[in-house]
Image: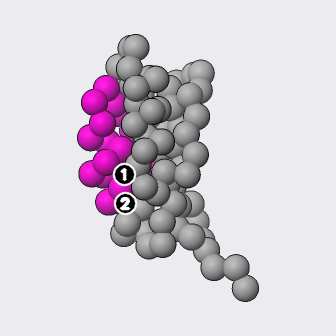
Amino acid sequence: MIRFMPQAFVLMNAELGSEDSIVNELKKIEGVKEVYQVYGVYDIVAQVESNTMERVKETITWKLRKLNGVKSTLTMIVME
């Protein structure tokens, strides 16, 4: 049986010109599985995964949202 790993997708708005540095920092954070720079309303999409939902939420709150250049985020938690 495959165990569900709690995960979320975080859509991020970045200050103009800070996208590359944010992407580089995101790739260093434990729990960040995928990072994409995108066109449209948001600038960056990150996939966060961990063994508990509490850890996913902590990673988003205390690491992703605190990065320099991040203006705003929208978090979508994946349903089990």
Q: Report the residue that reaches farthest toward the top.
A: 17
Q: Is residue 74 visible?
A: no
Q: Is residue 24 visible?
A: yes
Q: Identify the mark at residue 31; answer none if there is no mark.
A: none
Q: What residue is at 31 percent from the left and 42 percent from the top?
A: 65
Mark 1 surroundings within 10 Å by alpha-carbon count, few (fewer than 14), some (14 through 19), many (20 or more): many
Q: Quadrant of the C terminus?
A: bottom right
Quadrant of the image occupied by residue 28: top left
Compared to residue 50, the image places residue 64 above or below, namely: above
Q: What residue is at 58 percent from the left and 34 percent from the top?
A: 36
Disc 1: which residue: 60
Q: What residue is at 46 percent from the left and 57 percent from the top?
A: 31
Disc 2: which residue: 57
x, y percentage for residue 75?
45, 48
Amino acid type, mark 2: Lys
**In this picture, residue 52 sits left or right of residue 33:** left
3D distance between C-alphas at marks 2 and 1: 5 Å
Q: What residue is at 70 percent from the left and 79 percent from the top?
A: 2
Which element carries disc 1, helix, strand or loop? helix
x, y percentage for residue 14?
39, 25
**In this picture, residue 45 sits left or right of residue 58:** right
Which element carries disc 2, helix, strand or loop? helix
**Front one among 40 and 59:** 59
Amino acid type, mark 1: Ile
Which region of the structure is painted magenta? 57-76
Compared to residue 46, the image places residue 38 above or below, namely: above
Q: Quadrant of the N terminus?
A: bottom right
Q: Is residue 47 magenta?
A: no
**Front one among 47 and 30:** 30
Label pair 2/1, CB-CB below 8 angstroms: yes
x, y percentage for residue 67?
30, 36
Q: Report the residue that reaches farthest toward the bottom.
A: 1
